[in-house]
Amino acid sequence: MTTRRQFLRLAGLGAGLVALGGCAGGMPAPPGLTVPLGAGEVGIDLAGTRATTWGYGGTVPGPEIRLRAGETLRVPLTNALPEPTTVHWHGISLVNPMDGTPGLTQPPIDPGASFEYAFAVPDAGTHWYHAHSGHQLDRGLYGALVVEPAAEELAYDREYTLLLDDWRDGLDAAPAGGHAGHGSPPGGSGAFGGTDAAEDPGGPDRVSFGGRSYALMLVNARPPADPAIFEVRRGDRVRLRVVNAAADTGFRFAIDGHPLTVTHSDGMAVRPVTVDAIRIGMGERYDVLVDAAVPGAWQIGVLAEGKTGFGRAVLRHTDAPATAAPPADARPAELDGRLLTYDDLVATGPSRVPEAGVPDRTYALTLRGTDIDVAGLAPGEPLPVHHGEWVRVTVRNEGAHHHPVHLHGHHFQLTTAGRPRKDTAVVAARGGELAFDWRADNPGEWMIHCHNHYHMEDGMMRTISYR
Ligand SMILES: [Cu+2]
């Protein structure tokens, strides 16, 4: 049986990564990792349909990058796309010039040009990388970035990474390369403001994260007709790292016959909590443990939240007699079971902000139309902070879609009782509110924005500026 350590090494080799330093036979982990990446045109196979898209390293998803907390990642990026690009390292509290925000932390990388990203990764966890220019994220420009802790505290036998995505590229008559290949808004208008009726088949409790329609929902770039198969053996405890890499779609995630024990949210440890299903907004990550107790081939269901679409993968026992995959559209009953909420998340690590008292600075954000309004500031005006401050951000969502709000360069703690650390948090539609606290300990210019890529491009973003 393949041990976890062997599996990781094999997985790393499979991704074509280049490790610096010796790592043979029990030597210490290498001090850093260099992963040359090209961003360019990629052909993928969607159950027999050839599609052309944009990706990293010639694959979709891009190669999984793995290194250890505290190490330095170097990525010489070559842009073979026909337009400028940058890469954002989502979930990494890195140095500001490497954050990949075009025009704010670096000039866009022109077609044919290169740029070397180099930064230390301070925090272990399931993170990811993706394009941060134009609508490139709605293509295949994303990959997992897994940072392992110095000593793994979780016990498990094997692990898999699942990147969830909404997909249209190559599936309509329009030629690849233009915006026609991206998700289409209903009625041909902007993604905002339209009625929700056409995109809300589940009723009023099934609000969507965005109004665009997609032909397919993918898991690791595999469509339901040709699903990713995750092989397990009876008795295995399996760690799944689930990343929502979609541009416009939140997902409900569950596995037929298998409860999910959530151990991490956005890469940060929480007290293990067992649920039937999780809801995951764009940019969010959850790590879950699953016990492979009952032999068979089990559906991993990925239901588009509040709009049409269903993706799937399969958890298959290699040592079971019956291993035929379930029907492509079979929906695990657990999708309608007990759903994880933020109130279930209890941080296990040390708090970076006081448990009580008054923050040094508070900003009140309102998501309205295509904007983020900030009380007391003019439209577009940066949000000043001073180094060392304890900052509280409150967010109210007056829109008709759920908005996952992402803060660059920091992890924040929700003000819920469990104070979970996250970097992306879903603010519910139609009056939903949440608040989070963070320590201003990473100087620079940082974005805070909705992780619906279309909402962001339409203006749902602001800049936080250290003074
Ligand atoms: Cu949004």
Image: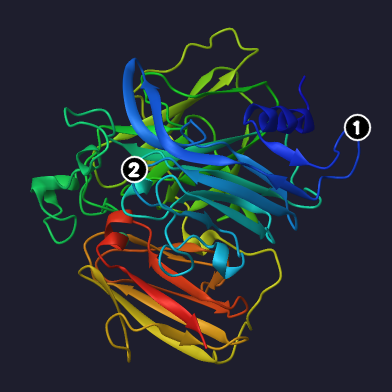
User: x, y (%) of residue 317?
Assistant: 60, 18
Q: Residues within 10 Å of mark 2 (few under 14, many from 20)?
A: few
Task: Determine the secondary structure under disc 1.
Answer: loop
Q: Quadrant of residue 240?
A: top right
Q: Residue furthest right?
A: 26
Q: Is residue 436 left or right of residue 177?
A: right
Q: Is residue 207 left or right of residue 299?
A: left
Is residue 111 visible in this depiction of the protein?
yes
User: x, y (%) of residue 447?
Assistant: 44, 70
Image region (quadrant) for ligand 1: bottom left
Q: Quadrant of residue 158?
A: top right
Q: Amino acid at mark 2?
A: Pro
Residue with the mark numbered 2 = 82
Q: Is residue 104 above or below residue 85?
A: below
Q: Residues within 10 Å of mark 1 (few under 14, many from 20)?
A: few
Q: Nearer the viewer, residue 152 or 171?
A: 171
Residue with the mark numbered 1 = 25
Q: Amino acid at mark 1?
A: Gly
Residue at 17% of width from left, 47% of height from top? 185
